[in-house]
Image (cartoon, helix red, strand yellow):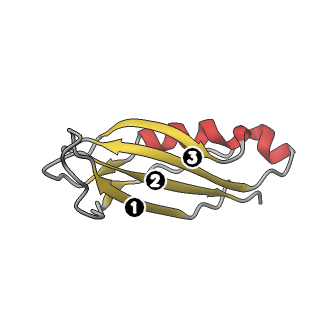
Amino acid sequence: MAVLTLAVTLSPIHSGAQQAQSGELLRRAITKVQPTYPDLARKMSIAGTVKIQVVVAPNGIVKDAHVVGGHPVLANAALDAAKKWRFESASEESSGVIDFKFEPR
């Protein structure tokens, strides 16, 4: 099982080029799904952090997610987990990065 350290920072998304971002908005994660440590990564003793960029809809569901950094063997597990996260509701979409830290045991 992977040991994970998770950090989430979300900032508002504004549509239209004329609007500027009003700073950081932190949305609390209500449901955090832990990624499954891939068998190949375990066999190869691969450790590291995978960064997933998420776009969260106003209702708290992850609308879009993609890998922005990390070991390719770990990336899909982190991406699958991030897509299942749920956040508190807000008045607008927000985006941010979730860090998944994998350490073999």
The local secondary structure at tag 3 comes to loop
Mark found first going from the N terminus, 2 or 1: 1
- Please name the residue shown 52% across and 51% down the image: 34
Closest to the observer, 14 or 60: 14
The local secondary structure at tag 2 comes to strand
Amino acid type of the residue tagged 2 in the rendering: Val
Horizontal and vertical percent position of residue 53: 46, 45
Query: Badges 2 and 1: C-beta atoms under 8 Å apart?
Result: yes
Q: Quadrant of residue 71?
A: top right
The residue most toward the left is 91
Residue denoted by label 2: 97
Mark found first going from the N terminus, 1 or 3: 1
Amino acid type of the residue tagged 1 in the rendering: Thr
Tell me how far mark 3 sits from mark 2, CA to CA: 15 Å
Q: Quadrant of residue 100?
A: bottom right
- Image-based side of 50 in relation to 80, left or right: right
- Nearer the viewer's eye, disc 1 or disc 3? 1
- Image-based side of 73 in relation to 19, left or right: right
Quarter containing the C terminus:
bottom right
Above or below, 68 against 3 in this view is: above
- Please name the residue shown 60% across and 40% down the image: 77
Residue denoted by label 3: 35
- Image-based side of 68 in relation to 64, left or right: right
- Nearer the viewer's eye, disc 3 or disc 2? 2
Residue denoted by label 1: 9
Tell me how far mark 2 sits from mark 1, CA to CA: 6 Å
